Image: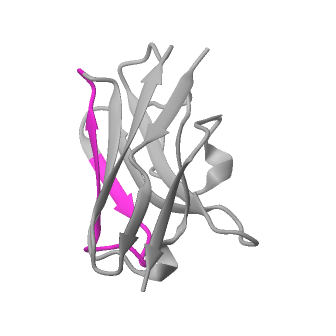
Amino acid sequence: QVQLVESGGGSVQAGGSLRVSCVWSGYRSRTYCMGWFRQAPGKERQGVAALQRVDVEAVMYADSVKGRFTITIDTARNTLYLQMNSLQPEDTAMYYCATTARCNIWSSLSLEPTDYSYWGQGTQVTVSS
């Protein structure tokens, strides 16, 4: 059973930075299709960043976070990271990491929640103005 556990959320002022982490267990593949998502109260869950490592590594970002957020992976530590800089109040949300076992050379990078089957419980990020 794949399990994902996020941590590192917190409260910061606008312009500040945070790094959230996601530790996984039970994932046996050597290919990685993972993503960070966020959900604010009353809004739908949206993709923030995605990473795919099959033969080469590729990343994708939502337009709203390009140039501010960076997704990275450390497979030796079973950890996915999201470095968030220049945070703004509109970044306030619960942040989730996700993965899928369907990850191969035919897979495409995706920011669609429906393309992921395993989810963590989330970590709250609050940005004050």
The quarter holding residue 120 reads top right
Where does residue 119 sit, x and y in percent of width and height? Answer: 61, 37
Where is 118 relative to 84, above or below? Answer: above
- In front: 115, or 38? 38
Which residue is located at x 29 percent, y 49 percent? 58
Q: In which quarter of the image is the C terminus?
A: bottom left
Which residue is located at x 48 percent, y 40 percent? 107
Which residue is located at x 45 percent, y 30 percent? 104
Left or right position of 71 against 62: left
Is residue 110 in sight in this rendering?
no
The quarter holding residue 13 reads bottom left
Where does residue 86 sit, x and y in percent of width and height? Answer: 28, 76
Left or right position of 83 against 120: left
Is residue 127 in sight in this rendering?
yes
Total marks in image: 0
Q: How is the image coloured?
A: one colour
Q: Residue furthest bottom?
A: 129
Decide whether residue 5 is among the magenta residues. Answer: no
Left or right position of 55 against 8: left
Where does residue 96 sit, x and y in percent of width and height? Answer: 54, 48
Which residue is located at x 60 percent, y 56 percent? 112
Stretch of the chain drawn in magenta? 58-76
Where does residue 15 sit, x and y in percent of width and height? Answer: 28, 80
Left or right position of 28 against 75: right
Decide whether residue 62 is among the magenta residues. Answer: yes
Where is 18 relative to 33, above or below? Answer: below
Q: Quadrant of the N terminus?
A: top right
- In front: 25, or 16? 16
